[in-house]
Image (cartoon, rainbow, N blue to C red):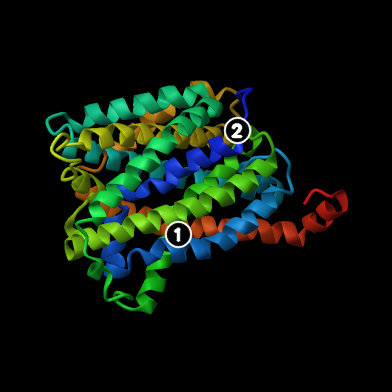
Amino acid sequence: MSQQSGKLGIREYVSIAILMVGMKPTGDLPTALFNMVQSAGWMIPIIAAGIFIIPLFLLVKTMMLYQNQNLFSVIQKLLGKYIGSIVCLFIFILSSSIISIDSRTYTNIIRTFYFTTTPNLIIYSILMLVCAYGAKKGIQHIGSAAYLVVFYAVLSLIIALILSFQDSNIQGIFPFWGPGKLEILKSTSKSLYIFLDFFLFAMLIPNFQSTKDFRKGTWVAYICVCIQISAAVLVFISLFDTSLGGIGYPFHTEIRYISLGSYLPNVEIIFFVIWIMGAFIRFTAFLYINAQMFCHIFKIKDYEYLIPALTMLYLLMGSIPETPLDVGLVIKPIITNVVGPSFTLISIILWLTAWLKGEFKHANKKDIV
């Protein structure tokens, strides 16, 4: 498959990761976590990050054995042509399901809070068309755009959280352990999907200036998004308390009541503009990664011609659910409960296979690792 001549650096990669993972609290994630363990919802991202760091470490270590090879190439080398192809197709199907459901969720947010009279299909089509245009430009352009936007996206989230914290009640996080430690651990196993993007980022390794940039950038971004997600959920729990369980999109509910003095009473439009730019970049990068997956599986050289077809496919898939409740309460939990454990297991299997084949010993002799 053809690649863009430009390469990703650490700053572009970290920017993409923060926009794809760190901005998840601006969607329905805080509500989902609260409904799992109530006041202890803010702990889930930290514990999940602590658990997922093991398979992620093994995945990164395995990928470092194969210089400039993407995830699917490594899977097929380690698991064989046929089994590897089945695993790759399974990953692609899960990733496609995620982008369809998440993009539909963002469409629901836009229509619910900002364009209430515009049909869902129109909003959804515009969102996906913009992302398709960006994905065709290549990962270097996506990384550059992410680097330009990430500062404002993170800053706007911090400002919103600080302004919200003024009206928050820290007592909302009590009882500290929510329904109990055992229930927290059970819910954490269902929440590993929060960091699934780091698994998919291994598809971008050939686009990096150096594989070391991938390794360093992964850990920098991982720490940043873990803190960012946990802090955001903590503030939302303190602000909304028990009512958080009934609020689908707490970030957008919150910013409607934020004001910066009498001169700027309604500033939600500023937050919305920054948020939608981050959303465009998130799904643009997601669409690009999925296109690379499809190209690798079916041996297609030019991914640019595939982007429009995949965009229409995801648009149709995301349009199937009739209501936001179908998306958030029925379909999404099923997918996320499969994705987290599956990607975790695949990472461990890849490392274990490489170890059994003696790949690490050979790498040590060649000073690769």
Residue 126 screen position, x and y as percent = 29, 25
- Judging depth in this view, the residue of 158 and 143 nearest the camera is 158
Q: Which labelled disc corresponds to residue 320?
A: none
* Secondary-structure class at tag 2: loop
**Which numbered mark, 2 or 1, is in the foreground of this view?**
2
Marks 2,1: beta carbons within 8 A: no
Q: Disc 1 residue type?
A: Leu
User: From the viewer's perspective, is 285 left or right of 236?
Assistant: right
> Could you tell whether 83 is left or right of 120 in the image?
right
Task: Depth check: give the residue in front, 365 or 264.
Answer: 264
Viewer-side residue, 344 vs 261 = 261
At x 45%, y 37%, the residue is 286
The image quadrant of residue 293 is top right
* In the displayed structure image, the side of residue 279 where residue 113 appears, left or right: left
Q: Residues within 10 Å of mark 1 (few under 14, many from 20)?
A: many
Type of the residue with mark 2: Leu
The residue that mark 1 highlights is: 192
Residue drawn at the location 50% of the way across and 57% of the way down? 342
Residue at 20 percent across and 48 percent down: it is: 254
Spatial CA span between label 2 and label 1? 26 Å
Query: Which residue corresponds to the image point at 35% horizontal and 29% vertical from the top-left?
Result: 128
Residue neighbourhood size for the residue with mark 2, other residues' Cα within 10 Å, grouped as few (<14), some (14–19), many (≥20): many
Instruction: Estimate the x, y position of residue 288 in percent, counting from the top left.
Output: 49, 32
Q: Which residue is mark 2?
A: 8
On the image, the x and y values in percent for residue 22 come to 42, 48
Regarding residue 251, the answer to whether it shows in the image is yes
